[in-house]
Image: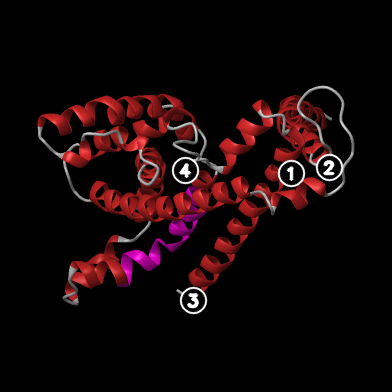
Amino acid sequence: MNKRNKMTNRDKTYWAIIIPVLILFFTFNTLPMLKGFFYSFTNYRGYGTYEYVGFRNYIDLFSDARVGKSYLFTFKYALAGTVLVNVLSLIMALGLNSRIRFKSALRGIYFIPNVLGGLVIGYIFSFIFTYILPAAGTALHIGWLQNSILASEKAAWVGVLIVGVWQAVAMNTIIYISGLQTVPEDVYEACMLDGANKWTEFFKVTLPLVVPFITINLVLSTKNLLMVFDQIMSLTKGGPAQSTESISYLIYKNGMDGGQFGFQSANAVIFFLVIVAISIFQMTVLGKKEEQL
């Protein structure tokens, strides 16, 4: 009888914890998503009345040049960022996992960018790109550095990329460090006895054993970089001449301020499906690679 009462109390505690969480998740995540999906079939402007328009918004998306340009920028940014983030993260993880002094303190320092807000970091780098670097370029007579990189249509995306990569590297580095710590020490000792150099040790031993962690980092970094918003908002606001307008920023800007709530809701639905498709593709391909290894 006492055991039954204990189980009942445990169940009550469980539901007392889980129900508020489910309510909050449904209210702030699932419900807005369902409403956005509904509005994607209307001409809703974000205010006032609206009419049902069927699939017109989805059809118009494929003929909108601005939407196409934002997708191209976002894919270019995400591809370059994913490569840089994972290469730099793995290099730093290898360094921080080696036998160096103050290793724990350095790990904490490297993680700071991930703690800071994207908008805060963006505004700091905006000041650096706009004032500090041009001033340094003028003082040192370096021509290409005298103008803000954010003012160039061709180069502004590089400034956004630098900030995005700098912030994303932190989390990926921690994950890679966790992966490297799972590699048994006796494997490295066996490599050393066989006379393998550091390059052979890395490509033949370390890399295959941390492939599951590479999979995690590739999926997470690609998803996060595709959804870039804070850096665009604080650095360029999509400019100059819409050259750095990401999909997320376009959905926000035109959906909230441009009277295209229904149209951009359709854009958000398509973007969601694109991210899911890319993530599934990455997991499938990299999962097969893990099985081969």
Q: What separation in Å lies between label 1 and label 4 (alpha carbons)?
A: 22 Å
Colour mapping used in the image:
secondary structure
Disc nearer the start of the sequence (3/1): 1
* Residue type indicated by callout 3: Gln
Indicate which label's residue lies in the foreground, 3 or 1: 1
Q: Position of residue 230 (x, y in %)?
A: 49, 32
Q: Which residues are magenta?
A: 204-222
- Do the residues bearing badges 3 and 2 touch, measured as CB atoms within 8 Å? no
* Residue type indicated by callout 4: Ser
Q: What separation in Å lies between label 1 and label 2 (alpha carbons)?
A: 7 Å
- Do the residues bearing badges 4 and 2 touch, measured as CB atoms within 8 Å? no
Disc nearer the start of the sequence (3/2): 2
**Residue density around tag 3, few if under 14, some if 14–19, many if 20 or more, within 10 Å:** few
**SS at mark 3 in the image:** helix
Looking at the rendering, which quadrant does residue 9 occupy? top right
**SS at mark 2 in the image:** loop
Query: Does residue 205 show up magenta in the picture?
Result: yes
Give the residue number, with chain letter if any, for mark 4.
243
Q: Is 225 left or right of 48, judged from the image as shown?
A: left
Q: What separation in Å lies between label 4 and label 2 (alpha carbons)?
A: 29 Å
Looking at the rendering, which quadrant does residue 23 occupy? top right
Give the residue number, with chain letter if any, for mark 3.
292
Q: Position of residue 233 (x, y in %)?
A: 49, 30
Q: Is 212 left or right of 3, judged from the image as shown?
A: left
| Most foreground residue, 240 or 230 | 240
The disc label shown at residue 266, or none: 1
Give the residue number, with chain letter if any, for mark 2.
41
**Residue density around tag 1, few if under 14, some if 14–19, many if 20 or more, within 10 Å:** many
Q: Position of residue 42 (x, y in %)?
A: 84, 38
**SS at mark 4 in the image:** loop
Query: Does residue 231 show up magenta in the picture?
Result: no
Q: What separation in Å lies between label 3 and label 2 (alpha carbons)?
A: 45 Å
